[in-house]
Image (tube, rainbow, N blue to C red):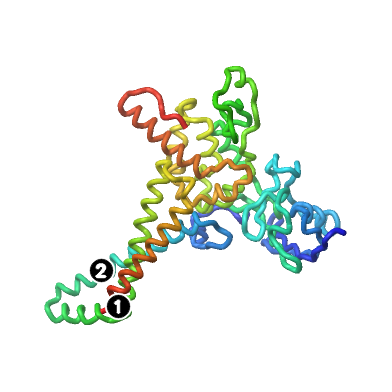
């Protein structure tokens, strides 16, 4: 009957309603992982264009200067910082270290990711 | 004079062969009552076909676990005032990740079998229990005193676990916490059950189990500790040294 576990229910992973900070960390970790995987493919496609010669390279450089691409790069930076820090949090707690502080570790990961994003955002857009 | 609230109880309904739907029941309640009291009143005065599980009414049996406004709760200790407000709707649903038997009652059979599989202890010597303010040293004779295990086997942790939502094969928080309580030092054979594809490594550290546990079992912490025990046992097996780290 309804309500049973199923492999199709992985979308429920992304529903934060009624959930706790541990789940928010879990959800953010998956979203950033998917984003970074997508970025990796995009990166390889762009690098492939560079092999097409100097003109393609110049076109790419012009594209890389556009605000939308810069915003995308900033999103990648934010995802990398958060995903990396949360990974450290998971490693620590998986070895029984700081389990009682896992929520604070999540908040710290988000705060550091935000601070890093602001720092690199100023570097990217500040000229 | 008793305070009165008018709320709507929106209850999940599903009988065999039927599609699930919600029935609304307008109720006058004392906000200091428990959610289970309101559900019982629906059964008593509005709809005798409503099916739900309950027994002790004081959070010992673990039978009345449901989702209240989307969050797993033991309804017998969930005060209406804490989960809704006057004039609001209170949504009551069965636990997730269990087959629905009828309305709010779910089939816990697979879960209970997993608890048995890991040798979950219903009672344990008080000297081994995790209690507040234990004495500095236990006397040998204290071991004759036993107490109930903290885990009520209510299934709230299974319902809240995002990994349990995707596969029924995953052992789940309560059985893994029970395995930690038994300990690999006492039962090293447990390693073959927990150190598996659907065992302790499948936990993705969302810690929802700990957040919803009504009995302070803290399954999240216990799963992490069990990982430590498992690594310790595997290392000692590898290097031929007997014994595993203490929990």
- The x, y position of residue B170, in whole percent, is 50, 45
Going by the picture, which residue comes out furthest to the left?
Answer: A54
At a point 70% along the width and 44% down the height, the residue shown is B63
Q: Are marks 2 and 1 in contact (CB under 8 Å)?
A: no
Name the residue rendered at 68%, 43% in the picture.
Answer: B62
Q: Quadrant of residue B217?
A: top right
The answer to whether residue B56 is left or right of residue B179 is right
In front of the other: A111 or B5: A111
Describe residue B154's horizontal placement relative to residue A107 as left or right.
right
Task: Pick whichever, B31 or B156, lies toward us.
Answer: B31
- Does residue B165 lie above or below A56 as drawn? above
- From this view, report whether residue A35 is shown above or below residue B155: below
Q: What element does badge 2 sit on?
A: helix
Q: Chain of mark 1?
A: A
In the image, farthest residue toward the front = B136
Chain identity of mark 2: A
Q: B10 left or right of A55?
A: right
Looking at the picture, how far across and down is residue A99, in whole percent?
46, 45
> According to the image, label 1 marks what residue?
A125
**Can residue A49 be seen here?**
yes
Q: Badge 1: few (under 14), some or many (20 or more) residues near its Cα, within 10 Å?
A: few
State the residue position of label 2.
A43
Q: For residue B83, what is the image quadrant? A: bottom right
Q: Residue at x 80, y 64 (%)?
A: B5
């Amino acid at each position: 009957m309804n309500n049973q576990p199923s492999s199709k229910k992985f979308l429920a992973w992304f529903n934060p309603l009624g959930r706790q900070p541990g789940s928010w960390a879990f959800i953010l970790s998956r979203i950033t992982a998917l984003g970074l995987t997508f970025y990796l493919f995009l990166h390889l496609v762009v690098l492939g264009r560079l092999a097409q010669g100097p003109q393609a390279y110049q076109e790419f450089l012009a594209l890389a200067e556009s605000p939308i691409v810069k915003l995308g790069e900033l999103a990648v930076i934010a995802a990398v910082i958060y995903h990396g820090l949360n990974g450290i949090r998971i490693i620590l707690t998986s070895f029984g270290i700081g389990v009682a502080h896992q929520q604070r570790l999540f908040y710290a990961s988000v705060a550091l990711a935000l601070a890093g994003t602001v720092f690199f955002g100023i570097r990217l857009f500040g000229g | 004079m008793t305070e009165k609230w008018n709320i709507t109880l929106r209850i999940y309904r599903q009988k065999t062969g039927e599609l699930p739907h919600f029935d609304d029941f307008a109720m006058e309640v004392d906000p200091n009552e428990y959610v289970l009291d309101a559900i019982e009143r629906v059964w008593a005065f509005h709809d005798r076909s409503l099916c739900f599980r309950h027994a002790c009414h004081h959070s010992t049996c673990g039978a009345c676990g449901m989702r209240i406004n989307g969050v797993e709760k033991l309804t017998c200790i969930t005060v209406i005032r804490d989960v809704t407000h006057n004039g609001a709707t209170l949504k009551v649903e069965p636990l997730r990740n269990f087959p629905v038997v009828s309305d709010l009652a779910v089939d816990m059979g697979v879960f209970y079998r997993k608890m048995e599989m890991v040798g979950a202890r219903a009672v344990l010597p008080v000297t081994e229990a995790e209690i507040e303010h234990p004495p500095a040293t236990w006397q040998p004779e204290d071991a004759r005193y036993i107490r109930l295990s903290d885990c009520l086997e209510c299934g709230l942790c299974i319902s809240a676990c995002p990994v349990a939502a995707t596969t029924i094969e995953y052992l789940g928080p309560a059985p893994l916490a029970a395995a930690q309580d038994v300990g690999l030092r006492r039962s090293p054979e447990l390693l073959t059950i927990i150190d598996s594809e659907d065992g302790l490594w499948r936990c993705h550290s969302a810690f929802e189990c700990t957040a919803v546990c009504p009995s302070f079992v803290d399954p999240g912490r216990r799963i992490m500790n069990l990982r430590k025990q498992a690594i310790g046992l595997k290392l000692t097996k590898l290097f031929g040294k007997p014994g595993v780290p203490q929990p």
